[in-house]
Image: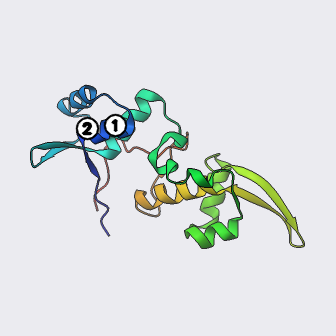
């Protein structure tokens, strides 16, 4: 299914990402952020506003709304098998994100089967949400800082 970009009213985008409305209007006028109007109100691309906020403010993944939705899970450990079952992610994908430092380890668990890593469930839930929004297999999901990857040419349309 086609993943459509999300647009927000300019004032809401400014509030949500902590940017000045005047600055956002300048970015619209220079073409750095896609915009439109709906019933006289200016709407802007949420993905592009988020990218600007990350650049201007040096945001961390923990500062993003996608992470904040799952912040209550921070520090709660989840095993790989339970994460796969609960979030429907590929185990090798989860492990790759762990190796890159996007998913944190909160501990280890030892039983008769051996030792297993317990991953931070807030990180897993955040990764799941960003991965789902990115649109599937074969797409870059995160940048080197664990933030959603921002395509240089804008979102792909299929």
Is residue 52 or residue 15 the one in the foreground?
Answer: 15
Separation of marks 2 and 1 at Cα, in angstroms: 6 Å
> Eyeballing the image, is 8 above or below 77?
above
Quick one: label 2, few (<14), some, or many (20+) residues within 10 Å? some
For image coordinates 38% across by 37% down, the residue present is 17
For image coordinates 53% across by 37% down, the residue present is 60
Picture coordinates of residue 153, whole percent (x, y) = 31, 43
Say which residue label 2 marks: 11
Q: On the image, which quarter does residue 10 sit in?
A: top left
Is residue 81 or residue 63 the one in the foreground?
Answer: 63
For the residue labelled by badge 1, is the local secondary structure a helix, a strand or a loop?
helix
Say which residue label 1 marks: 15
Extreme residue in the left direction: 40
Q: Is residue 120 left or right of residue 8?
A: right
Picture coordinates of residue 85, whole percent (x, y) = 61, 73
Q: Is residue 115 left or right of residue 16?
A: right
> Eyeballing the image, is 120 above or below 137?
above
Q: How is the image coloured?
A: rainbow
For image coordinates 47% across by 52% down, the residue present is 140
Quick one: label 1, few (<14), some, or many (20+) residues within 10 Å? few
Picture coordinates of residue 3, whole percent (x, y) = 32, 62
Extreme residue in the front direction: 72
> Eyeballing the image, is 69 above or below 29?
below
Picture coordinates of residue 93, whole percent (x, y) = 60, 61
Task: Please tell me how many numbered marks the rendered image carries.
Answer: 2
For the residue labelled by badge 2, is the local secondary structure a helix, a strand or a loop?
helix
User: Looking at the figure, which quarter contains the N terminus?
Assistant: bottom left
Q: Are marks 2 and 1 in contact (CB under 8 Å)?
A: yes
Q: Is residue 142 left or right of residue 31?
A: right
Rendered image: mark on residue 85: none
């Amino acid at each position: 299914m086609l993943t459509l970009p999300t647009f927000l009213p300019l004032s809401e985008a400014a509030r949500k990402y902590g940017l000045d409305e005047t600055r956002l209007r300048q970015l619209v006028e220079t073409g750095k952020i896609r915009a439109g109007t709906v019933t006289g109100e200016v709407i802007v691309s949420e993905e592009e506003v988020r990218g600007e906020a990350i650049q201007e403010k040096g945001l961390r993944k923990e500062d993003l709304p996608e992470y904040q939705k799952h912040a209550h899970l921070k520090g709660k450990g989840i095993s790989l098998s339970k994460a796969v079952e609960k979030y429907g992610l590929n185990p090798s994908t989860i492990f790759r994100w762990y190796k890159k430092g996007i998913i944190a380890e909160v501990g280890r668990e030892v039983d008769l089967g051996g030792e297993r890593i317990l991953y931070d469930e807030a990180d897993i839930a955040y990764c799941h949400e960003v991965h789902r929004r990115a649109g599937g297999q074969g797409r870059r999901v995160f940048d080197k800082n664990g933030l959603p990857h921002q395509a240089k040419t804008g979102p792909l349309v299929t």
